[in-house]
Amino acid sequence: MSGRIPSAPRCAAIVGPYLSGKTTLLEALLHSCGAIQRRCTLKEGNRVGDASPEARERGMGIEINAAHAGFMGERWHFLDCPGSIEFMQETLAALMVCDVAIVVCEPEAERVQTLGPIFHALDEYNIPYMIYVNKLDTANGRVPELMEALQLVSSKPLALRHVPIRDGETITGYVDLVSERAYLYKPGNPSALIKIPDSVQDRNEGPRQELLEILADFNDDLLEKLLEDVVPPKDEVYEHLTQDLRSGDVSPVFLGAAEKNHGVFRLLKALRHETPEATQTLERLIGIEGGAEGIGGEPAVQVFKTYQLPHTGKLSLARVWKGSVKDGSSFGNNRVSGLSVLMGHSLTKTAEGVVGDVIGGGAGKHHAVA
């Protein structure tokens, strides 16, 4: 993957049921990217994803919260969505502009049914998604039972990407099913590469074969190799995973514990390599090959959220699909004013928003992004 051309800005919506740990995952993603210096907690009441006073008072998200970060030379925008079903419209608004959704769920099979409305929305709009099973450190059940329960709710095949390493009942690391490398969790530090433990070696083969068989259902060449007992190169497997996520055929499943930063860096790497480009997302949204070429010659943005902030006034949040947007740019009778990127309700002025960016703008009732 070295020498890879950096991607344009991309956007991931973080969705999931109430109490699944979405905002905790957002904090972990931002901290892993170096966008925030320390991870805040619900008790402290200053998390990026609980930006509004109402959200902090309730102890839960009630609207979209946007944040941005850089990861390995590329710009990312994250949209943390509320989990309560009464705020589902906020989630739908974020899904309409994201390149990929990260579905956060708890590790208990009996709670999987709460994902039904989210999976239904993702399927209806053909949105690629990854699943992050959170709080695995507190799980009572086993991963195979959880995967079985998830598959019963999901209409598309789910591909488990790694299996946990256990010391008794404690999860101490994981084995990546594609790279076939093992990692040991190090609190406060990146996971350490280790030799695959003998206790995991045998039970690693079954899940890896299942992963390859799921991918082979959508690729005849890979199917032929498996039938001939040919081991496909790892780079080829990664390519199939990318293609199948972007086409919406398969969704990968990652395991972790966001509060302890377990599995977060691995999720970031998968996002970086497998998430569709903004131009591909636009093509999916408008159903026109070539995407941006089908919406005329002017710059194009899509407003998907409007805030009424105490000291700023009306501020609209938008995704840039074509061209660029600068302070003072006009869209019809509306003029962009106070162009910013958001970190919760904290605004940082920016000179320009380019294709893929999520930007905020508007300083009065006659000024909006679009």
Image: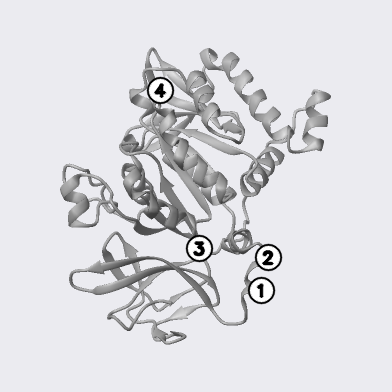
Query: Could you give the CA–CA distance between mark 4 and mark 1, rounded to whole angstroms?
Result: 46 Å
- Whether the residues at callouts 3 and 4 have beta carbons within 8 Å, the answer is no
Query: Mark 3 sits on what residue?
Result: 9
Query: Could you give the CA–CA distance between mark 3 and mark 4, rounded to whole angstroms?
Result: 37 Å
Which circle's residue, 3 or 1, is located before the other in the chain?
A: 3
- Whether the residues at callouts 3 and 2 have beta carbons within 8 Å, the answer is no
Q: Position of residue 282 (x, y in %)?
A: 59, 63
Which circle's residue, 3 or 4, is located before the other in the chain?
A: 3
Q: Secondary structure at mark 2?
A: loop
Query: Could you give the CA–CA distance between mark 3 and mark 1, rounded to whole angstroms?
Result: 19 Å
Q: Is residue 83 visible?
A: no
Looking at the picture, tell me which residue is in the foreground, 72 or 151: 151
Q: Position of residue 323 (x, y in %)?
A: 55, 77
Q: Secondary structure at mark 3?
A: loop
Q: Which residue is at a point 36% across and 58% down the rendered structure image? A: 67
Query: Mark 4 sits on what residue?
Result: 110
Foreground mark, 3 or 4? 4
- Whether the residues at callouts 2 and 4 have beta carbons within 8 Å, the answer is no
Badge 2 local density, few (<14 within 10 Å), some, or many (20+)? few
Foreground mark, 3 or 2? 2
Badge 4 local density, few (<14 within 10 Å), some, or many (20+)? few
- Whether the residues at callouts 1 and 2 have beta carbons within 8 Å, the answer is yes
Query: Mark 1 sits on what residue?
Result: 293
Which circle's residue, 1 or 2, is located before the other in the chain?
A: 2
Foreground mark, 3 or 1? 1
Q: Position of residue 189 (x, y in %)?
A: 35, 38
